[in-house]
Image: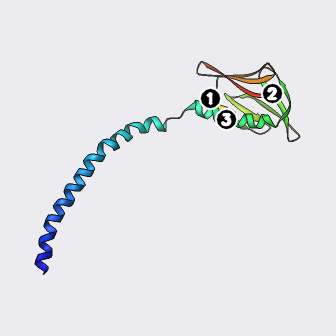
Amino acid sequence: MHRHMCADRRGFALSDLLVTMFCTAALVPIAAGCIVLLPQLSAFHEDVQDETALYQLRRLCMIAYDPAVSSDTLCFSYKEKDWQLRMVNRRLILQPGTQIFLSEIDSASFTIENGVIYCVYEREGRSRSAPLMHE
């Protein structure tokens, strides 16, 4: 009986090896395609980061009151405090404290058009404008 079981095992190992090789050959092109895409997926996209930061800033501005705009500073009141949004050291920050919204920007200013306050900022020679709040 022991001989009979050993005879069956010899052929089983060969079929296991063939199935494994077939599966590996089928999966290698798929894995190679995924590996090629990894550097593109892990790259930092500043536009996505900017939109996220501006969305958070818009949410804050929705509940703020008494906005005042100068060319380089947006002042408003929020929770009984006066806040300032301005550019410091290539970053758009909210003070008091230092909450950074946009980083590595070349310039930032605030404008009012049709009752809407816009943040206009420039990064790497490309200018962008984003609405923040109503007057």
Asked if the residues shown at circle 3 and circle 1 are in contact, with their CB atoms under 8 angstroms apart, the answer is no
Q: Which mark is residue 53?
A: 3
Amino acid type, mark 3: Ala
Give percent across and percent down for residue 134: 81, 27
Marks 3 and 1, Cα distance to the nearest angstrom?
13 Å
Q: Residue 107 or 11: which is nearer the viewer? A: 11
Left or right: 113 as drawn, with respect to 24 = right
Residue at 72%, 33% (x, y): give it.
93
Instruction: Reply above or below: 3 against 48.
Output: below
Which of label 2 and label 3 is nearer to you? 2
The colour scheme is rainbow
Residue at 68%, 32% (x, y): give it.
54
Residue 34 lies in quadrant = top left
Left or right: 25 as drawn, with respect to 66 = left
Residue 46 lies in quadrant = top right
Q: Which mark is residue 104?
A: 1
Residue at 77%, 37% (x, y): give it.
60
Q: Earlier in the sequence, mark 3 or mark 1?
A: 3
Q: Earlier in the sequence, mark 2 or mark 1?
A: 1
* Residue that badge 2 annotates: 134
Task: Identify the element where label 2 is drawn.
Answer: strand
Q: Residue 22 or 53: which is nearer the viewer? A: 22
Residue at 74%, 34% (x, y): give it.
58
Give percent across and percent down for residue 85: 77, 30
Amino acid type, mark 2: His
The quarter of the rendered structure image containing the C terminus is top right
Q: Earlier in the sequence, mark 2 or mark 3?
A: 3
Instruction: Reply above or below: 32 against 47.
Output: below
Marks 2 and 3, Cα distance to the nearest angstrom?
18 Å
Amino acid type, mark 1: Glu
Residue 67 lies in quadrant = top right
Task: Identify the element where label 1 is drawn.
Answer: loop
